[in-house]
Amino acid sequence: MLRVDPKDPAPIWSQIEEGVRRLVASGALKPGAVVPSVRDLARDLKVNPATVAKAYQRLTEAGVLVVRRGDGTYVAEAPPAMSRAERSKILREAATRYASLAATLGVDEAEAADALASAWKKGGKP
Amino acid sequence: MEEGGQAVSDPIRIEALTVRYGRAVACADVSLAVETGAVYAMLGRNGAGKSSLVRCLLGQQKPTSGRALLFGSDSWTTRRAAMERTGVTPEEPDAPPAMTPRELSDFCRRVYPRWDSSAVAARLDRFGIPPKTPFGRLSRGQKAQVQLALALGHSPELLVLDDPTLGLDAVARRSLYDEIVGELADRGTTVFLTTHDLSGFEGLATRVGILKEGRLVLDEPLETLKSRFRRIRYGNRLTETRTAFGTELDAFDAVRVLVRGWGIDAVVSNFDEAAFERFRAIDGVENAAVEALPLEEIFLAVAGEEKGDAA
Amino acid sequence: MTAFVAIVRRELRERWQVLVAAGVAAFIPIVLPALRRLPAEARGWTSLLIALVFALGIAASLGAASLVPRIANRRIAFDLARPVSAGAIWTGNVTAAAILALAAAAIVWIPSHLAGSPTVWSELFEDPSLSRIGILAAVAGVPVLFAVVHGVSLMFRSRSARLALDAVVGAACVLGVSAAVSRLPEFLAAGPRILCLSGVGVAAGVAFLVAGHASVAQGRTDIHAAHSALSTALWTTLAAVVAAAHLYATWVMSAGPSAIAAHGFWVRPADAGPWVEISGRARGAAATGLYDTATGRFERTRTVDWRGPTLSGNGKLAAWVEGGDRGAPAHPLRVRSLDDPGAKPIATRLLIEGYPALLELSDDGSRLATWHRGVLSVHDLVAQRTLVSASVPIGEQEEIRGLFVGPDVFRAYRVGDRSIDILQLDAGTRKLERLGRIEGVAGRYFMTDASGSRLVKVGPGIGLYDGANGALLATLADSPSRYRWPWMLPDGRIVMTDDASRLRVFDRDGREQSTLTLPPECIGATAVSRVQIGGEVAPDRFAFGCTRDASHRTLWLADLRDGSIRKVADGLSPVWAFGARPALGSDAAKLFYGPDQRSLVRFDPLTGERRVLLGRTP
């Protein structure tokens, strides 16, 4: 499910946060589903629990996860719907970065679109 | 209370520590601090001075100059009190070989003000250690597990682990990580460890130090380390305007540059996006690609060894 | 404390097998004598020997194996990574080793003791009371042995050049101690010598224990630092011990006359002049020496027992033979000029064999007579050579006394229980003559005057004889009485107590001159009063002391001109020595012992002037 990539320059907590967001957005983690405890996730990923805790805290503040005392951490019932404008902005920024990277590699639009399509197939779903 | 950017109550503070054996220098002017709750991974090749550093840190050896402070006090003079709050696992197992794990726990119970015998027994059980087998007859992995169990029995505020996974198989290593992660989760223990197993502890470390020939050549949070190191690969084709290459990587503080058949393979330590854009625009630079590095590769580049260390 | 207990328990648990070995060995002394038909005593010796071997062997092997290897291979880090103090590690290991060693010894010894073998431990000691101390020393020696073996094995194991330095300093300490001890010769200061050696032994044991602790506390995982800390602690402590031993030896042997006078002491004045021989004990050692009562100068002489320095008649020269621990080889005769303030003792070329029973100087100090093992000799001290020797054997109950009657002529009296032989050795003619014999006497007490022409013999009566040929000149008293005692005044007159109530005075030919009645205070309630004549302080005036009991002494001045006696002091008694002949008005005539003989007082009976020279008067 969640993976932490040592080669990814992004901080681990950021990778975890992104990963959870992706899982929630793709529906792999359904609203109300239980999320692994900080300790268990830290164990699985072999990362510092504080790092996991930081990611979970950010997700809780963002309303993606909700903590029920004594019970555990769950996906929020109604993860916040991003405003269209927000979603568009994030999507456009990501697309720009992708296009720029592709150009750097000297890849043409067709090949870039191809790669995007297969990634969508693989990574978008569990 | 703050003092030059370091809180006085840091569990570990090493100040200008130098260790000399005759004319050979094991540690040269090493200074670092480990904050409460941090996990500090000290990397270095064999002979880089890690063992001397750890011994001086724990008050087991007197440095030639400088000092090491545990919980704010010189560890050479206040060793005994500091050890009440510190758990230690050595690189070489040093528990008396004739004692069984149960007897070892018993010994520690008498010696520490607080000792949770049942938790230690549960831990040993989890590791699958036979409690009545003499320590000397356990396998390498079992010995390491027993020493870790003994180090955790008094719920220390600080753990000092000297190459805790050295010589361990994957199963033993895994169980060790799990215990450490459990401690971090339950108590937020501060950890100072030396290691060759960079991939294993990469996730756990919050701060990294690299010891090279006795000098601390690097000491920073893992996050910033990973954000500034990159691997840049590019082809360099001589053109009419460009007749030679040599300074194009200067902006990035290259630490290792390899000239291959297809081009240059460089590890740089001062990467930023804008500078990379400019770099790509240099005449003659072709197919420039950048990727992040795992900690292992960063270490190899900084510590300067071509062969990989034992994992 | 709990860390210490934990360490002891751990060490005991690890090494309990030695006790099993001891248990097996305990059978040997029980079984062995039965197999070989040895006496029961052999059982006692065997069990003692095996017990000692176990105790010392365990202490030594643990000394080498407990800590030094763990420092060398750094495994001591296990204990150091725990809240265990270096003190707990050291004392824990020492204690555990001691417990194991002593328990093993007990396991070996007790069963054979219960099986009826005699305790032979006390037979190792000359003095039975020392056997208890011996046990204490053996028990204390176990941890000390541990510490010593720990120290030595650490010195070798660290493989550093410091070992050579340790050897040198160690040798220097040993030499330092033997130098200090040699300053306390057995024949003079046997007690202080043993005290010094014991003190050094105990201090050395403590030094090794302290140094062992330092090696753990300062060395920790570094064997070189451990060696360094051990050496520093050990040698500084031992250097202090050596210094203390020397200070002690100096203190003992530098005791002066006031230290001697603090306990019972004895003074023999020269016939003239202010010097005396003073003898007693001070600071645990026998102390004898020459003391100048005028200036307080003191010179200690290393003489044996009662063979202290002899002084010449004119009080200007002293001569003596020094003692030694190795019996009596030929000693140089030593002399010191007494009237020269800057004089030092000189070892003359005269080698005197043994400690002569007779050592007499002529009045001017130029000649010396000695008698040793049947040989009478006269020596010239100016030329430092022997002038003449003659064979003068004596029987078992006899002794030799004598005096110089001429420049080179020595008159010797060979006195036995029944007779006195009068001999004369002339260095000029080199002849030994037999001059006469006095028969029918009892006891050995007699006096001669300064010229040797008159001899007064006590026993059975009191007779006055010619000192040269032994002819009886007069009988002063013919029946024995314990209250009759003669003294000779410088000019040859004889003063004699009679019936404890009178003093009778005779001239040098035995004719009675006067009788003085002793005052009642002198006589005493039970009429047992001791009278002692002092010196003649002025013509016809002499002092004498009466002792009624130890606490009641009085001093009187007798005036022969008018026959009067008056008391001059309380508590003083004349200094009197066998064979002394204080000259008229000499310093010796004015020397007195104070009350309880705890002080020496210079007192002029005529003027009443008094000065305490040594000691205290209450």
Image: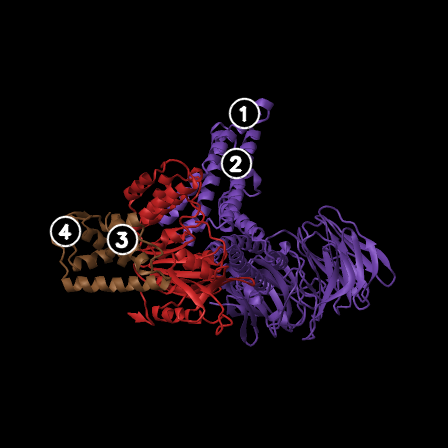
Subunit under mark 3: A
Q: Which amino acid is tagged 3?
A: Ala
Q: Which residue is labeled 1 in the image?
A: C31
Q: Any idea which chain is the brown one in this picture?
A: A
Q: Which residue is labeled 4 in the image?
A: A69
Mark 3, other Cα within 10 Å: few <14 / some 14–19 / many ≥20: few
Q: Residue furthest right?
A: C429
Q: What hue represents chain C? A: purple
- The residue shown at (45%, 48%) is B92
Q: Nearer the viewer, mark 3 or mark 4?
A: 3
Q: Rounded to the nearest whole Å, what is the CA distance between mark 1 and mark 2?
A: 15 Å
Q: Rounded to the nearest whole Å, what is the CA distance between mark 4 and mark 1?
A: 79 Å
Subunit under mark 4: A
Q: Any idea which chain is the red one in this picture?
A: B
Q: Rounded to the nearest whole Å, what is the CA distance between mark 3 and mark 4?
A: 42 Å
Q: Rounded to the nearest whole Å, what is the CA distance between mark 2 and mark 4?
A: 71 Å
Mark 1, other Cα within 10 Å: few <14 / some 14–19 / many ≥20: few
Q: Is residue A48 above or below residue C101?
A: below
Q: Which residue is labeled 2 in the image?
A: C51
Q: Could you tell me which secondary element the residue under label 1 belongs to?
A: helix
- Residue C443 placement (x, y as % from top left): 67, 50
Q: Which residue is labeled 3 in the image?
A: A117
Is there any visible trace of residue C520 in the rendered image?
A: no
Q: Rounded to the nearest whole Å, what is the CA distance between mark 3 and mark 1?
A: 98 Å
Do marks 3 and 1 share a subunit?
A: no
- Residue C337 placement (x, y as % from top left): 71, 71
Q: Is residue A65 above or below residue C385?
A: above
Do marks 4 and 1 share a subunit?
A: no
Q: Are the residues at dot 3 and dot 1 in contact (C-beta closer than 8 Å)?
A: no
